Each structure stands twice: as C-alpha cells, then as structure tokens.
Image (cartoon, helix red, strand yellow):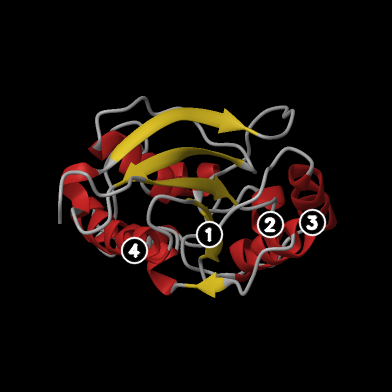
Amino acid sequence: MSSSAPTTRILVLRHGESEWNALGKWQGQADPPLTDDGRQQAFRAIEKLGTFDLIACSDLQRAHETAQIIAHGIGVGPLIVDARLRETDVGEWQGLTHSQIERQWPGWLDGHRRPPSFESDTSLITRFTAALGDISELCAGGEALVVAHAGVIRVMRRALGASDPRIPNLGGCRFLLTPGAGAKSLLVEDVVELLVHGPVGEEL
C-alpha cells in the first residue's frame, strides 16, 4: 500500500449504560441489555455527532442497540456487526462486583493481576486491530463510527502509549488508520465525552 493511501478516522465509543453497569457488575462478554437511561444516552449522543460513512458495532446487545439508535438517528446504514469488537473476556470475574472480586481475590485489582480465564491484552489487540483494519478498508479516507466497550478502548490506548483514563458511557476516542498498513499505522487521539457525566460506573 502506498504511503499516500488515505487515512481513515474511526471514532470508537463506549455503549450506553447497561443493566449490569447500573448494578456495578463486571460484564466482559456477558450480554445484559441497555437500561432506559442507556437508551436515552444514545439518543442524546446523536445531537453531538456529525455524519459517518459507516457505523459498526460489537455484537453484544448493549453496543448493538446503542449503535442501532445512533445509526437510525443520523441516517447511516446498514449497520456492520462484528464480534471482534466485543469487550474483553473477563473470565472468572464475569458477573461479580468490585467488592466481590476484592473479597475473593484480595489485592488483585490494585496489583493489576487477572484470573486464569481473563483474556490477554495480546488477544484483544489482535482481534480489535484486525476489525479496525477491515473497517478502514471499507471507507478508506472517510469517517467511521464504532460502538464498542470501555475495556477494549483502554487496552488499545495503553498499547499505543496514550493516557488511560476511565471511559464513561458514550465516551471514547478516535483511531487513525491507513488502509492496508495494519497496526504499523495505527494512531490514537485524545479521549472525548459526548455527555455530561457524574461518577463513572464499572466499565467491564
């Protein structure tokens, strides 16, 4: 691919509030639906977004429904659904609250330790980067919107040497990718928040 290939801008957003977000449970690849507040967050986000050449999302319903609301609101379709955009698989921690994890694995969260079935960063980066690459090929030089998950956004930001803040619902950042160049051309911009938030709930 020529170095003059057009760069695709991909805005990756976290989904609206899910039922497990509201309960403070780690979700991973579990599939709880949006809350009514989460749906309203998606509708409110439409007012802050421009148009896009393509909209894609994780196949988990909290991301899928958020993307459906936005796609319908701004008139972009058909929606591309891609399982590679899923949240990190959190293994044994799925369905547990922060306090439950701390009781059963004391010190592990602060020590950045993870249980045996927790998906590795390498696995996540590989699948997510491949998905972004395919999206960049579909709208080379254009603007895409991806509705995904806070955990994947944070892992990708860390891998690219960027800051690692908490990501609120309908927050995220842009990734810049040259079609055909893969991870070698992947860059990341600052975090954006489309909505005014209070404290950020559990992300994963």
Q: CA distance from mark 4 to mark 3?
A: 30 Å
List the residue tagged with mark 1.
Answer: 27
Residue in the image at 50% along x and 45% along y? 11
List the residue tagged with mark 3.
Answer: 39
List the residue tagged with mark 2.
Answer: 18
Q: CA distance from mark 1 to mark 2?
A: 9 Å
Residue type at mark 4?
Answer: Glu
Q: CA distance from mark 1 to mark 3?
A: 18 Å
Circle 4 Cα neighbour tier, 10 Å, few/some/many (<14 / 14–19 / ≥20): some
**Image-based side of 150 in relation to 154, left or right:** right
Circle 3 Cα neighbour tier, 10 Å, few/some/many (<14 / 14–19 / ≥20): many
Give the structural element (helix, strand or loop) at label 1. loop
Q: Say which label, 1 or 3, has the lower sequence index.
A: 1
Q: CA distance from mark 1 to mark 4?
A: 31 Å
Badge 3 vs badge 2, beta-carbon distance below 8 Å: no
Badge 1 vs badge 2, beta-carbon distance below 8 Å: yes
Of badges 4 and 3, nearer the viewer stands 4
Residue type at mark 3?
Answer: Arg
